[in-house]
Amino acid sequence: MSTMFLGIVIFLILLAIFDLFVGVSNDAVNFMSSAVGAKVASFRTIIIIASIGVFAGAAMSNGMMDIARHGIMVPMHFSFYDVITLFLAVMVTDVVLLDIFNTMGLPTSTTVSMVFELLGGTCALALIKIAGGATDAAGVPLSLGDLVNTEKAISVILGIFLSVAIAFILGSLVQWIARLLFSFTYGKERGYNLKIGIFGGISVIAIIWFLLINGLKGSSFMTPELKALINENTWLILGAGAGVFSIIMTVLSILKINILKCIVLLGTFALAMAFAGNDLVNFVGVPLTGLESFLDYSRNGIGDPHSFTMESLMGSAHTPIIFLVLAGVIMVISLIFSKKAQNVVKTSVDLARQDGGDEMFGSSQVARTIVRSSTKFASSTARLAPLSIRRWVNSRFDSSSARLPEGAAFDQLRASVNLVLAGLLVALGTSMKLPLSTTYVTFMVAMGSSLADRAWGRESAVFRITGVISVIGGWFLTAGIAFVVCALISTLIFYGGLIAIIISIAIAVALLIRSNKKYAEKAKEIKEDDLFTELIHSSDQKRNAQLLYKHIQRYDLQHLAFIAANYKSATDAFFNEEYRQLKRSLSEIDEERKKLKRQRRREIIGIRRIDPLIAVECNTWYFLSNNSIAQMMYCLKRLSEPCVEHLANNFSPVPDEYSGPFIAMRNQTIKLIERSGDWLAKGGSFQEVDLIIKDAKAMQQYLSSYRKTIIDYLQTNRSNIESMTVFLNLVQESQELVRSLRHQLRGIIKFRQALSLEPRTLSTL
């Protein structure tokens, strides 16, 4: 029995190591997104500063939060077997949940996931014990309140709601005031040095206070006496510090030192340090508590794990420094090498981006309603202010004159507000003993500040709000799923014993392998669009023209290959009466059309980054080519839908004397599409494409003639009407498919000419 529990503890520690990698990847958004989004330094420099903060915070943390020990459960009423069951369920649930959210690129909270997992597992085991007639030492039956620390659970839930709402509102308000003071041209205004000096002084003392209250609260030199001294003289420290640092920052600004850059880098370090010092328990608290429980059971147990209670967990934890240092090293390694960390940071940066670009999220009915209502409310409210005031306010928010570093999503002023305000809110919540989530606070402050900065324009607001709703929904979904899943796993392990333990471990490992495999596939897909990333970051219009054409060429090739493959699979499935295959082909068409829509948005953005005179001519031919591909996909959809219904109703198949000739023409059509793809891939000559277009025109005439044959059949032969009607639609859509292919080729040729990538010697098409 002891060997089994030792194996479980070892597995928990292994999961803790993986949890450190996954957790840092997820929470990197807390302290890196503002610095990355504002491009205050190279990504390597930001990583180094964040890594130093992470390691310092982990190494100087003097212990773990006691939430894993007695924050949710009351361990004196739980046996060693209960505790190990709970901890195994928590770790299995936690690692899988975090990895799934990272793979999706959505930031979630390690604090909330762990707390709700503990809460769900504890509630499940508590109900089992109550149903079994558990009593305390005096023989009084135990209730749910005796077994679960409900007060802590309620405070966590309230902290979630409060942190989300307050962070968003304050982020909007503070950024609006900051923009009124500085506008987007803050470096050129009169009195800038004094204003930025005062702003910098307040920001620096806020960050230092955040470090004292939150980042270093668990350090060995933060004695109770020093903490009391800081708490008793808070306003004196803040006031005097703000004055001193304001003078220092003003002098530095006069000396042409970038104050905002210093604030952002210092804020990044502070948040990284506080994250490691405070959230380390979320990753290793449960496994180390499990190890301590096992050691206590090994030393004092009498052999029965069901009767040995865990009173030892009622005391505070004292973690050996070696564990903290090792955890810090693992977190730094994860931060440096994790691609998922960069993906999660990208989500927050894209949603807060000042200018337009490729939107990660689609639109939703809720977002459309919010945008419509907010627009009407803002318009009616603005009319209440005098026209002169409205004009002045609008001039302060005019971002057209802003000069952002190449590749920056927003300016350094907003990055500073994000970091300083997030640090203040987390420090304030800590001092008031509110369990705020650093993930929630930093993300919502960033969203609020981007809204105040008018980064959510009419063309992007619905997509940004959909993204924010998706992320927030994911947070609350995390809490609910963590509670339910951990409760179920705890119940299964409790009753299933060794078999359930082995199954749980196997499922966890399998899901992690599957999740990482899917992420690798998704990362490969994202990497394929490196051309768009290079395009939006380049300021060379001639270079942009080449990148734009390469982008169009790459994705047009993919779409043509898809059209050829789907056309063949759909028609084969129809003639062979393979209903599931035909349904699958129809579903694939919808997904490909979504990809085409995203591609078109990116390429329209790309056209804006080339020479405007060239862009005027390019637009017409680009839309001709792109719309032709869209039409070909729509042909496949119109072709497949009646065929699906036909097979679903189990109607008679098309006679062989008609399907045979069509298959021959279909194969020739597929060869035309493949020839078009080959020509596009190698950038062939006009003579080659002329031949393809002529052959396509001939195929279009063959299909037209064959369509008339089918119509004659329907007029003279009354049998098999259902099959021939569907078959007629198939031939008509095939004819339209070939016609659209001709237009697509003509559009891409003219587009190449407009970009001056080809000599203007094209023959008449």
Image (spheres, rainbow, N blue to C red):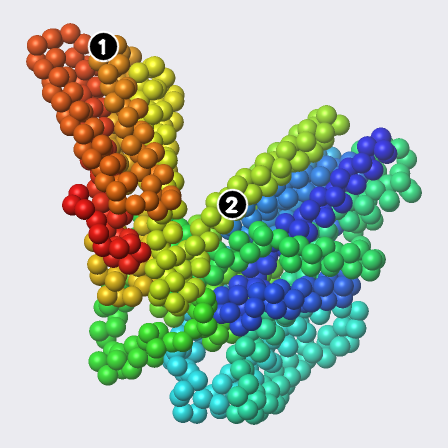
Q: Can residue 632 be seen in this view?
A: yes
Quarter assignment of residue 143: top right
* Residue at 64 percent of width and 80 percent of height: 234
Front-most of residues 465 and 435:
465
Measured along the vertical axis of the image, is residue 349 above or below residue 397?
Answer: above
* Residue at 71 percent of width and 70 percent of height: 216
User: Residue 492, percent across and down?
Assistant: 66, 30
> What label sits on residue 126 in the rendered view?
none
* Residue at 18 percent of width and 46 percent of height: 763
Say few, some or many: other residues with alpha carbon within 10 Å of mark 1 (under 14 / 14 to 19 / 20 or more). Answer: few
Relative side of 174 to 134, left or right: left
User: Residue 312, percent across and down?
Assistant: 83, 49
> What label sits on residue 524 in the rendered view?
2
Three-letter residue code for mark 1: Glu
Q: In which quarter of the image is the N terminus?
A: top right
Measured along the vertical axis of the image, is residue 744 above or below residue 453?
Answer: above
Relative side of 332 to 452, left or right: right
Helix or strand or loop: what does disc 1 sit on?
Answer: helix
Quarter assignment of residue 375: bottom left
Report which residue position mark 1 lands on: 657
